Amino acid sequence: MLSNTPSRKIAGLAAGLVLGGPLVAQPGLAHAAAPVIKWKPCPADDPLEGKVLKGLECGTLSVPLNHTRPAGRRITLALTRAKHTGRRYRGAVLLNRGGPGAHGRDLPALFRKAMPKKLGASYDWIGFDPRGVGASKPSLVCDESYLNPGGARADTLPRTPAEEDAWKARAKKYADDCAKKYRDVLPYMGTRNWVGDMEAIRRALRRDRINFFGFSYGSYLGAAYATSHPHRVRRMVLDSVVRPSGTWYANNLDQNVAFEKRIQAFFRWIAEHHDTYGLGTTAARVERTYYKVRAELARKPLDGKVGPSELDDVFLTDGYSNLQWSTHAWALSDYVVRDDPKALAGLWHPPGRLGQNNYAMYLATECRDAPWPRDWSIWSRDARRLYSAGNRFETWSNTWYNAPCAYWPVEGGPRPAIGSPRPRILLVQASEDAATPYPGALETHRLFPASRLVVQRGGGNHGISLSGDVCVDKAVLAYLRDGTLPADRKGPDRTCRAPASPRPKPKPAPKKDAKPSRGVPAASTGIPAEAVIPPTA
């Protein structure tokens, strides 16, 4: 689910611990004439992104499907650029919001707005839809009924062996459909090939070194690139850091525990504002209220579409971020206190084209990156163990989110090697992040001895750079401005105190013609595709 989960822990380079073999070399690529990206104004209304690309430049780049065979079949990457406009030029920054599988062509517009004007004007901000994603070709979409069967999905919590078998059959059907449609490309859809694509983009941009800003899975992609091409890294910010040694099965198990802790924090917050929401004066009472609603929706889904699985998907976003805590608490309050289901029903939107694509590429990447258990009894045992230990909010939904990897047509692994003594990377992490738990940042910090780690102590949001935390943003902007990093210290190199919890907001007015989400509502893998980067304070 981190599109997934992440956490990570390693003994360190000095101890000789290696995560898998080296990235595959690319014969002939270093000496081949690199293509040039031909930029042109993006359309005012893009078929996938709508109007958000207006003012950006669009381009495409042909890359090998298999980077070890550069003369073989080629695929196409779709890119965007917000070109530098200032007198000073600091180079190009590749942007990745995570997933894996999240689109990225809208990111240059968001970053340009988030940056101080002069600093933003000094970079070329490069967005791209990774291979298999969005406007890149081919763009993968598999069995759409797995996420959207046309009504409420089956409850992710299997109460009988027959219900568990039915979910297993659905997961296998999804994997089989992907195999039927894309068997020829699935072997080349892992992080190793994304690293090759990043290097191809660097060469096409005619830059000796590249800058990179990645969130969530993007932190893993950046770390893999920095390991394979350490001398090509200029500045690299990795926010919400994946644990390399846990990719990906173990990281998802860690996530189940971390999301339970985070949803309990949300329940406590609701209880603290019982006078506003009326859902209980303790976290335990709010939790009982939530699961009572969940049981009611299992018996009778709202509008036939919002059942217990959809409810969990909606409230999963509250584990990623507290930005919607008030909105979701009001919707739950309307349903429970005022017997009004409209707001709760309106929070769920089935995934559209980008959401289905995001999910397919999440699996195509993670199932390929590393080995997954092929014996279902292992999955079932781990899920039941974690659920019985009290981690009931996310455990089973996360299990079914990843279950197609048990039947994936391509074996996973070996993992890319991660770690290098050279790159001076800036790592940014909230200590209570549920999607990429804190040990991942500590592990990656050890694997890159020249890196610096900024920790938001007590923060629980996933993706905290450029979100208004002055302490965090000061470190990020100083690094982007002139390469300045915090002083080297034992443990975190800079610790920032998390902002206060949000205050309840006024009850939102009913929305008319609400737009469907462009992302996968349950995407446990990284920055949600519909997320925006708020401007700095």
Image (tube, rainbow, N blue to C red):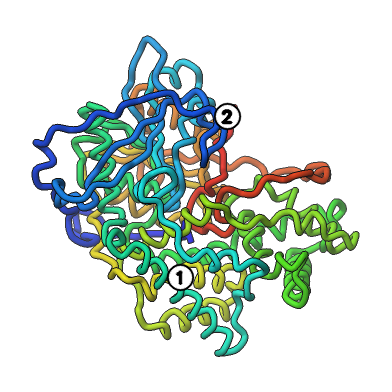
Q: Which one is in front, 37 or 109?
A: 37
Q: Which one is in front, 363 or 535?
A: 363
Left or right side of 363 for 37: left
Q: Which mark is residue 174?
A: 1
Q: Residue at x 28, y 70 (%)?
A: 411
Circle 2 residue? 535
Relative height, residue 496 to residue 372 (above, below): above
Residue 247: give x, y in percent of width and height. 35, 62
Q: Secondary structure at mark 2?
A: loop
Quadrant of the image for the C terminus? top right
Residue 428: give x, y in percent of width and height. 44, 42
Q: Residue at x 61, y 49 (%)?
A: 517
Relative height, residue 498 to residue 118 (above, below): below
Q: Secondary structure at mark 1?
A: helix
Left or right side of 108 for 326: right
Residue 502: give x, y in percent of width and height. 70, 44
Would you say the residues marked 1 and 2 are in contact, meaning their CB atoms lie under 8 Å apart?
Answer: no
Q: Amino acid at mark 2?
A: Pro
Q: Residue furthest bottom?
A: 161
- Whether residue 468 is visible, yes or no, is no
* Crowd tier of the residue under label 1, counting other residues whose Cα lies within 10 Å: few below 14, some 14–19, many 20 or above: many
- Whether residue 182 is visible, yes or no, is yes
Q: Residue furthest top?
A: 87
